[in-house]
Each structure stands twice: as C-alpha cells, then as structure tokens.
Image (cartoon, helix red, strand yellow):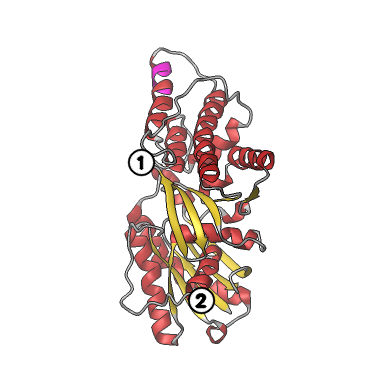
C-alpha cells in the first residue's frame, strides 16, 4: 500500500511516498529556516505564504522521485493538527482538493503521532506497546503507545517545552535560529558541572515537566553577568543548561517506565536529535536491560515520511476524512 503524505505544520513544506508504513520510497522537504532566521523565529504569516508557493512542486517532486503516479497511490495522509493554523490549512486544503479530484481516500494524521511513527521507519522491528518521550520545540510529552492509533499521555510540560527552552536560551547567548541545534554543538566542548542550575519538579504530578523556571535561571545568569561585565564561558553555560534539561527529561521518563513496568522505551521529535539525550538514554537503558529505540537524526525534524508511516496505520484503523476536514492549532495526541 502506497501512501502519499503531506506535512505543513510549521516551517517545512514536505511530501513523501511511503510503502506499508515503513518503506520510504521518496521524501522531499523544503525548509524555510534561512528566511525565518532574519526574525529569530518562525513568522506564521510568512510560513503560510511559503507553503502555498511550495506545496505543488514539492508534491510533484515526491511523486516523480518515487516514479509513481496518482494511480499508484492508495491514500493521501495529511497533517491536520497541531501546528500553526495558517500553515496547516495550506496542506489540509491541498490534500482535500487532491483527494476530491482523484477519488483517493484522505487520512487525517496527528503531528505528534507522526513523530512517534518516525521510529517505525528507522526501526523496522519496532511494534507497540512502548513508552515514548516526545520532545520538540512545542511539546514535551511522555506517551504510552498502547497500539499504533491508541495512545495515552502519562506526563507533559506544564509550561515551556524542552525545545522552546533550548531555543530561547540559545537566542539569549546570541545564537541564530534554530538555536537549540547550535547550543547542542557548542555544549560538546563545555563542562556541564560548571554552573548549578535548578531542576524544577511538579510535586503533584511526578511525570510532568516544567522548563520555564530553568529557562529563566539561565537567562538571568547570562544577563546578570553581562551587567556586571563578567564574561561567561559559553560552552560551559551551554553544557550546564543542556545537562539540566536532559536530566529532567531522563529522570521523569525513567520513573514512568519503572512505575508502569515498561521495558521498551522510544524517543521522538526534534529534540530527540540532541546528542546528550540520545547518549544518556542509551546508557541508562543498557544499565537497566531496557530496549531503546530512536529515529535517525534525519527523521527527527518535521518531514512527510513520518506522516506517511502513521497515516498507513490510521488508514488501516478506518480513520478516513471527508471534504469537511479542518485544521486545528491544538489537539491532544489521545
């Protein structure tokens, strides 16, 4: 079964053709990062306009690279939530039009479910159930994946997401958007014990995260030092902050695994590319005898291949949409 997948939830216009949920035949991504760097972050109106300009050639390219026509496509999967509403609407409306004109079934696909599904591509033997840590610029969730389309949130951030905290800390240090990637690289040469930073705890919810206070702590450290004329060692600041964020993520994730007696752990989302997070969880899982899975770094960011993977399982479960399909800025993964 061949799925044509479309992704436009933020600042990447992407299309892919995926066979049986695991075999990527083609995957094309048009990034807007260089343009949004001028503003220090994604500008929703600009993102929407660029999606409208790119979506036709990107979908055409994906089909051409797969050497397949619409006659060989069994379903069209499209990200419909969550994300930037204007950006989502471009992909959803294009997919609806294509579905209506071709008669190909339309499959609405959740963005975070798709991030989890990126692991099915990178790890062909992976099957639910498992516990997944989904970490990105807008989300930080611990999700019990009971089946391909049945999921339950165990914990989530109460304020900022881990990726947002990384990006804002990096921006304060003068790094360009997206700063989290550069911060991770700079941290490699720093001492993660150089600065003592807080580990926020949500006392009434042991699996929930809170990164707002940690983000504020490192920003105050940087600003206070600048006001006093003290030059901080940037690699040490980056390393200390990265270590604190990863420590919070890993601690709660492993506690949830222990309490729910799950020994198969998975990570997904943009922040799952973070080198310390990947290394730490690999080591901790090896120590405990847990199975550990992570997506290839090329699949951690937004792409349509992951949408095609999840879309395949949504289609099998009977999740088919009509022409009344709408886009939603927020929606639970459940």
**Residue depicted at 49% across the width and 79% down the height:** 75
Residue 268 shows up from this direction:
no
Residue 9 shows up from this direction:
yes
Relative height, residue 307 to residue 187 (above, below): below
- Categorize mark 2 by other alpha carbons within 10 Å: few (<14), some (14-19), many (20+): few
Spatial CA span between label 2 and label 1:
34 Å
Q: Is residue 34 magenta?
A: no
Between 88 and 141, the residue placed more toward the observer is 141
Span highlighted in magenta in the image: 222-226
Identify the residue under disc 2: 316
Residue 123 shown left or right of residue 202 in the figure: right
Instruction: Give the quarter of the figure containing the C terminus.
Output: bottom left
Identify the residue under disc 1: 158
Instruction: Give the quarter of the figure containing the N terminus.
Output: bottom right
Q: Is residue 224 magenta?
A: yes
Q: x and y percent of residue 71 in the render? A: 54, 87
Q: Quadrant of residue 88?
A: bottom left
**Residue depicted at 61% across the width and 41% down the height:** 281
- Secondary structure of residue under mark 2: helix
Q: x and y percent of residue 211 in the render? A: 41, 35
Residue 87 shown left or right of residue 145 in the figure: left
């Amino acid at each position: 079964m061949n799925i044509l997948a479309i992704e436009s939830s933020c600042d990447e216009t992407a299309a892919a053709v995926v066979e049986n949920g695991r075999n990527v035949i083609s995957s094309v991504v048009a990034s807007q990062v260089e343009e949004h760097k001028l503003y220090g972050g994604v500008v929703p109106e600009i993102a929407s306009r660029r999606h409208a300009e790119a979506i036709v050639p990107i979908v055409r390219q994906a089909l051409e690279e797969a050497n397949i026509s619409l006659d060989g496509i069994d379903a069209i999967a499209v990200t419909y939530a969550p994300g930037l509403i204007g950006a989502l609407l471009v992909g959803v409306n294009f997919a609806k039009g294509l579905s209506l004109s071709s008669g190909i079934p339309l499959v609405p696909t959740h963005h975070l479910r798709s991030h989890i599904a990126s692991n099915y591509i990178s790890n062909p033997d992976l099957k639910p159930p498992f516990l997944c840590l989904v970490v990105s610029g807008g989300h930080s969730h611990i999700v019990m994946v009971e089946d391909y389309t049945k999921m339950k949130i165990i914990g989530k951030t109460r304020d900022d997401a881990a990726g947002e905290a990384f990006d804002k800390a990096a921006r304060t240090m003068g790094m360009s958007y997206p700063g989290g990637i550069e911060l991770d690289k700079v941290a490699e040469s720093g001492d993660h014990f150089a600065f003592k930073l807080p580990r926020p705890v949500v006392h009434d919810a042991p699996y929930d995260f809170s990164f707002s206070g940690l983000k504020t702590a490192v920003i105050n450290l940087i600003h206070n030092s600048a006001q006093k004329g003290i030059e901080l060692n940037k690699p040490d600041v980056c390393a200390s902050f990265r270590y604190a964020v990863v420590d919070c993520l890993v601690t709660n994730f492993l506690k949830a695994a222990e309490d729910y007696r799950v020994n198969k752990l998975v990570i997904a989302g943009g922040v799952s590319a973070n080198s310390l997070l990947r290394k730490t969880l690999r080591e901790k899982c090896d120590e405990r005898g847990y199975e550990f899975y992570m997506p290839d770094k090329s699949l951690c960011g937004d792409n349509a291949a992951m949408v095609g993977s999840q879309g395949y399982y949504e289609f099998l479960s009977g999740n088919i949409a009509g022409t009344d399909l709408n886009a939603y800025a927020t929606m639970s993964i459940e």
